[in-house]
């Protein structure tokens, strides 16, 4: 019976499957040339291709971005040349495919007789990648510009309106205090958004690595959630909306793979989103619970996770919009007001940390004509440190 190992050996290829941790597990035998890049591969059975192969860092990132779009299931790298740890030059090519919702990377060694053609293709590939990157940069700048204009206009409009109202000499003192509080809240919201935009622009030059995260830097998830809730409790109370925490993690603190400031901002974005769409007298709940996922890896069979679910009792989100809400930033009007830069920022953060965010909505019995009245839930999945 022909096996994958036999095929890899005959074609001088090596196949890897991505794990939830961001590492890749090898399938089949390890070719000799691959040991020049991953010397411990035979002993451990898994490695970080992004660190072992300089070229694959960008290729894997591109594959993740492409596979977010519906219909994309296969991406080829084209040929490239890279030197291993022994300074030996290799001519390689890679193929990325999605198999059962997992990213599979197959790397092939190019035969000697094809090197001349490979060099020509590599030059063309480099020019193509540069062009594609310039297009992505242009699109990202347009997205960020649209986000700034669209999302900053709301707090600025509210501040402007509050200032005009506060100039009324007949306005009671209590009403003026409410307007002052409203302006402070909107100023904080605008500053928070500006920091988020600056952070995303900086991420282009500074990648986050799970393996570089130190124990002292890994945030405690319970503390972050409790702090976010404490910050929002006054405004929830003012709007007559109940805000409750359901902590199923137990008494001990759980550290997660994330950046503390950004995680607090993600939680604040979700609570602010729930507040905006919750009617008076309703309830917003924050559920924290453990989760374990089978990675099918012999070296690491289970991955521990923390799941945070923020649920409201607002108008909800129709099923089709819930599925596409985090694919790409678009205007709020297309998502019934649920979109905007805040949710785009959340998705960018979770992707950066190796986690995920999804919108869970009961949908509607009327197709896409109206969202459900049973509310919406936003579910964050974070890796435990």
Image (tube, rainbow, N blue to C red):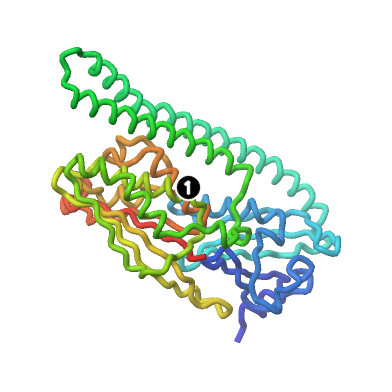
Q: Is residue 200 above or below residue 102?
A: above
- Residue 309 image position (x, y, % from top left): 32, 58
Image coordinates for residue 93, horizontal then vertical, percent:
70, 59
Residue lying at the far front in this picture: please name it.
Answer: 173
Residue 188 figure quarter: top left
Q: Is residue 209 left or right of residue 73?
A: right
Q: Which residue is mark 1?
A: 262
Residue 370 visible in the shown view: no
Numbered-mark total: 1
- Looking at the rendering, in which quadrant would you find the N terminus? bottom right
**Taking 27 as reference, is 115 left or right?**
right
Percent x, y of residue 169: 19, 12
Pick out the residue farthest to the right.
87
Looking at the image, which residue is at 58% across and 44% down? 203
Task: State the image coordinates of residue 88 (x, y, percent, origin top left).
Answer: 85, 62
Looking at the image, the residue that sits furthest to the bottom is: 1
Which residue is nearer to you in this view: 301 or 62?
301
Using the image, determine if residue 380 lies above or below residue 27.
Answer: above
Q: Is residue 373 visible?
A: yes
76 or 45: nearer the viewer: 45
- Secondary structure at badge 1 equals helix
Identify the residue at image location x=78%, y=56%.
82
Quarter of the image holding residue 276? top left
Left or right: 295 in relation to 29:
left
């Amino acid at each position: 019976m022909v096996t994958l190992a036999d095929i890899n050996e005959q074609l001088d290829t090596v196949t890897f499957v991505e794990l939830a941790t961001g590492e890749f597990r090898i399938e089949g035998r390890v070719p000799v040339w691959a040991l020049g890049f991953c010397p411990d591969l035979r002993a451990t059975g898994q490695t970080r291709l992004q660190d072992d192969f300089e070229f694959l860092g960008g290729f894997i990132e591109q594959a993740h971005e492409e596979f977010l779009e519906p219909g994309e299931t296969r991406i080829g790298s084209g040929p490239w040349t890279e030197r291993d740890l022994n300074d030996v030059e290799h001519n390689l090519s890679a193929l990325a495919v999605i198999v059962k919702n997992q990213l599979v990377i197959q790397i092939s060694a190019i035969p000697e007789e094809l090197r001349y053609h490979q060099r020509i293709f590599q030059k063309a590939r480099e020019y193509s990648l540069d062009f594609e990157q310039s297009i992505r940069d242009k699109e990202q700048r347009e997205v960020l510009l649209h986000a700034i204009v669209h999302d900053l206009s709301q707090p600025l409009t509210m501040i402007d309106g509050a200032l005009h109202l506060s100039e009324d000499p007949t306005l009671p003192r209590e009403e003026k205090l409410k307007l002052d509080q409203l302006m402070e809240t909107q100023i904080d919201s605008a500053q928070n958004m500006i920091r988020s935009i600056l952070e995303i622009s900086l991420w282009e030059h500074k990648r986050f690595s799970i393996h570089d995260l130190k124990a002292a830097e890994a945030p405690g998830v319970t503390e972050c959630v409790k702090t976010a809730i404490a910050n929002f409790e006054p405004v929830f109370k003012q709007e007559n909306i109940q805000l409750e925490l359901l902590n199923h993690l137990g008494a001990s603190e759980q550290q997660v793979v994330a950046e503390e400031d950004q995680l607090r901002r993600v939680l604040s974005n979700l609570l602010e989103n729930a507040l905006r769409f919750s009617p008076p007298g309703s309830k917003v709940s924050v559920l924290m619970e453990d989760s374990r996922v089978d990675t099918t890896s012999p070296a690491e069979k289970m991955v521990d996770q923390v799941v945070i679910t923020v649920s409201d009792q607002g108008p909800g989100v129709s099923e089709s919009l819930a599925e596409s809400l985090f694919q790409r930033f678009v205007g709020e009007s297309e998502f019934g007001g649920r979109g905007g830069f805040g949710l785009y920022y959340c998705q960018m953060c979770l992707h950066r940390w190796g986690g995920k965010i999804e919108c869970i909505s009961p949908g509607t019995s009327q197709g896409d004509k109206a969202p459900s009245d049973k509310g919406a839930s936003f579910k964050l999945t974070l890796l435990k440190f």
